[in-house]
Amino acid sequence: MKLAGAFLVDKKEVIIILKSCRYCGKIHKSDYTCSKVPQRKKYSTEQNSFRNTSLWAKKRKQIKERDKYLCQICLEELYDAANKYNYTDIEVHHIIPLAENYDLRLEDSNLICLCAFHHHLADRNKIPKSLLNEIADRNIQR
């Protein structure tokens, strides 16, 4: 075998592509998995399993349509809203988290559309749940 750039050519003239490993610093064949690569641990919880169901995808779409694909906090111009009509990075937020009450996972009154910024604030209880419930209830009545 002889080294030629980023690949090897063996005695049978077969090209073997090489890659530099960022975990161990050595050069491996491109199909080799280095033992130094950190392994991610996947935590299988009831909440995580629910988020991968078609039932949740359908409900999430319904809530986005109900809220017109707009962040409801931005629409109210509360909590440092950058735009009144924010339709980027819209996520559906569980007002009462799944871990606290799993039975409310598909209740319209427990779901609201928020942008990523306001979703982050709501998850850290910077936006009161009572305000989020009030907005969600108002949207249901429309």
Image (cartoon, rainbow, N blue to C red):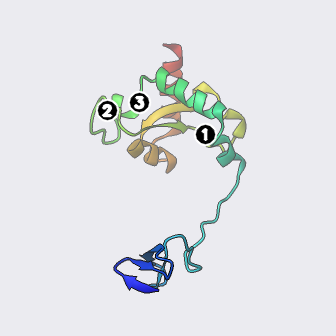
Q: Position of residue 64 (x, y in %)?
A: 48, 27
The amino acid sitting under disc 3 is Gln
Which residue does the numbered mark 2 point to in the structure image?
77
Task: Decide which of tag 2 and tag 1 comes sooner along the chain.
Answer: 2
Residue at position x 65%, y 43% in the image: 98
Task: Decide which of tag 1 and tag 3 comes sooner along the chain.
Answer: 3
Which residue does the numbered mark 1 point to in the structure image?
96
The amino acid sitting under disc 1 is Ile
Viewed as shown, does residue 53 lie left or right of 28? right
Residue at position x 60%, y 70% in the image: 39
The amino acid sitting under disc 2 is Glu
Residue at position x 41%, y 44% in the image: 116
Q: Position of residue 121 (x, y in %)?
A: 44, 47
Task: Decide which of tag 3 and tag 2 comes sooner along the chain.
Answer: 3
Residue contact at pointers 1 and 3, CB within 8 angstroms: no
SS at circle 3: helix
Residue at position x 66%, y 31% in the image: 55
Which residue does the numbered mark 3 point to in the structure image?
72
Q: Position of residue 40 (x, y in %)?
A: 60, 66
SS at circle 2: loop
Q: Depth check: 3 or 99 in front?
A: 3
